[in-house]
Amino acid sequence: MDSTEDRANILREMKVCRFCLSDKVNQLSSIHDKHPSESKHSIPLPIQIMACMTIEVFKNDGMPQLICNTCRNLTQQAYIFKTNCKKADEALKLFLATGQLSKPYLQRVEQLMLPPEPQPILIGQHPYVETPKEPPPQPKIRTIKQIKMEAGEVITVDVTEDENLQLVEEGQHESEGIFGLGDDVEQEAGQ
């Protein structure tokens, strides 16, 4: 059985993205290295991660130190969006104080890419596949209608969305017409 120390060493050496666990080695790069697409004046990626995700990322924290291109892109977009929101908020608050609205420079956020499908990950000799969870079933819509009959009585009908309920006038075929369904009664039965 592996000891905690052995598992910690395995974890540090894993060639997976720290954020999505992708193991596509050709798309992984160090969290701490500047990506070729970044300018020399851009905010370091670990700072962007801590600002947006409140996850602390340090060189010697015992975790994988790699990030995939998709997660790098998403992090940078999230950071740009967050800073744009802050700038806009500050401009609006300044307007309240001074009456002047100065539009700050807002960086353009590129269109988001969909994350890749979950991939099997081998941890030791045990495959682990993360599968998306099914959304919880939606509650059925209930409709309560009151129908005023010709004799003056009022019938209350409780229908859920998956029921196909039709009231047919006696002696009339179903396709010839529906009698009163959907007419909400707004007056008393005796009127």
Image (cartoon, rainbow, N blue to C red):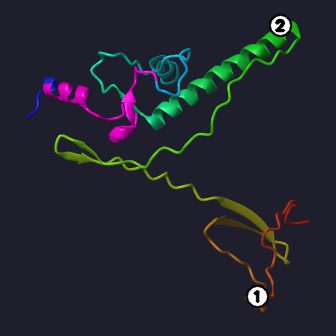
- If the image is split into quadrants, where does the N terminus sit? top left
Vertical placement of 119 versus 144: above or below? above
Residue under numbered circle 2: 97
Count of numbered circles in the view: 2
Asked if residue 104 shows in the view, the reply is yes
> Label 2 vs label 1: CA separation?
67 Å
First-in-chain label (2 vs 1): 2
Vertical placement of 187 versus 2: above or below? below
Q: Residue at x 35, y 42 (%)?
A: 24
- If the image is split into quadrants, where does the C terminus sit? bottom right
Label at residue 140: none
**Residue type (three-letter) at the residue carrying disc 1:** Ser
Residue under numbered circle 1: 175
- Mark 2 is surrounded, within 10 Å at the Cα level, by few (under 14), some (14 to 19) or many (20 or more) other residues, namely few
Q: Depth check: give the residue in front, 86 or 173.
A: 86
Residue 72: % across, % down: 47, 31
Vertical placement of 76 versus 57: above or below? below
Mark closer to the observer (2, 1): 2
Taking the magenta stretch, the answer to whether it contains residue 173 is no
Q: Secondary structure at mark 2?
A: helix
Residue 88: % across, % down: 73, 20
Q: Which residues are magenta?
A: 6-34
Marks 1 and 2: in contact by CB < 8 Å?
no
Q: Residue at x 66, y 66 (%)?
A: 159
Asked if residue 22 shows in the view, the reply is no
Q: Depth check: give the residue in front, 162 or 99.
A: 99
Compared across the picture, whether 45 is left or right of 102 comes to: left
Furthest residue in direction right, as rendered:
191
Residue 19: % across, % down: 40, 32
